[in-house]
Amino acid sequence: NAGVTQTPKFQVLKTGQSMTLQCAQDMNHNSMYWYRQDPGMGLRLIYYSASEGTTDKGEVPNGYNVSRLNKREFSLRLESAAPSQTSVYFCATPRGSYNEQFFGPGTRLTVL
Amino acid sequence: GQQVMQIPQYQHVQEGEDFTTYCNSSTTLSNIQWYKQRPGGHPVFLIQLVKSGEVKKQKRLTFQFGEAKKNSSLHITATQTTDVGTYFCAGPGNYGQNFVFGPGTRLSVLP
């Protein structure tokens, strides 16, 4: 998926462990987003960053923190993972005249 | 807050049959977008509708925006196995330039 990369692709954690999901875009975009996808619930916005140095809460921010390290990178951190955070996490950036969401390949996280 | 609903949740069709998914919003939308997600993949933008009553076509796919701009539909004519995936509608959100996604309709096509 040219433009937005995410690491890792898969991760298994135990309850209470911490980890950081990485996202980088080479499209020189200001805005970046973190969504989580759960069965039957679509994609829900966790956090977003409208520009380098700014971050804001989205719809479901509890249990997460983010860092906009520079214009390219936007990371999502789980300080103490819980089974309810088992999900697929997508990073995205708006693109084009319609601001359509351009997604990275995703990180599939399981918390045991 | 804004909610976007979709029906059905799942649809199984025989190859060659038609398929329709419906999207409803709790609020009037300035525009609506549709995405397709292949199994194991990420959502990919298909189209945006802006005008009341607008109809757009992409080959076998027909997208429609309701007159009241609160509902939309995606119709696929003569489905093929390449149509397999989950189709999401999405309306503008309240956080920057994000979109609020419906729960999606998962389409299975039996050969």
Image (tube, grey):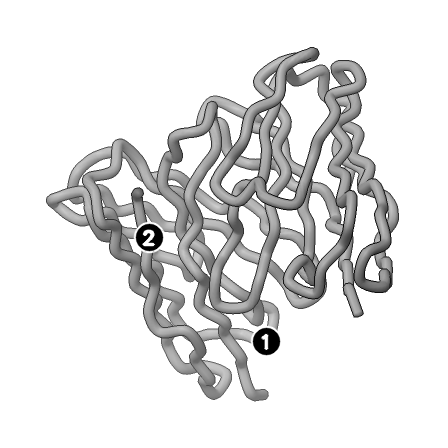
Whether label 1 touches label 2, CB < 8 Å: no
Q: Amino acid at mark 2?
A: Val
Instruction: Give the quadrant of the C terminus of chain A.
Output: bottom right
Tell me the SS state at disc 2: strand
Q: Earlier in the sequence, mark 1 or mark 2?
A: 2
The three-letter amino acid code for the residue at tag 1 is: Thr
Where is residue B35 shown, x and y percent of the image?
A: 50, 50
The percent position of residue B99, horizontal first and vertical second, equals 44, 38
Tell me if B101 is positioned left or right of B20 in this view.
Answer: right
Rate crowding at label 2 as few (under 14), some (14 to 19) or many (20 or more) other CA atoms within 10 Å.
Answer: many
- Residue found at the very far left of the displayed protein: B68
Q: Which mark is residue B81?
A: 1
Residue displayed at 67% across by 41% down: A64
Near mark 1 (Cα within 10 A), the count class, few <14, some 14-19 or many ≥20, is: some
- Viewer-closest of B61 and A110: A110
Q: Chain of mark 2?
A: B
Chain letter for mark 1, please.
B
Question: Along the line of sight, which residue is nearer the eye, B52 or B6?
Answer: B6
Mark number displayed over residue A2: none
Q: Which residue is mark 2?
A: B4
Residue at 25%, 47% in the rendered image: B55
Give x and y (percent) for residue B60: 42, 61
**Residue visible at 77% across and 32% down in the picture:** A75
Relative side of A84 to A78, left or right: left
- Residue at the spot x=61%, y=50% of the render? A36
Q: Nearer the viewer, residue B100 or A101?
A: B100
Whether discs 1 and 2 lie on one chain: the answer is yes
Q: Quadrant of the N terminus of chain A?
A: top right
| Quadrant in the rendering for residue A74 | top right
Q: Quadrant of residue A111?
A: bottom right
As displayed, is residue A54 above or below residue B88? above
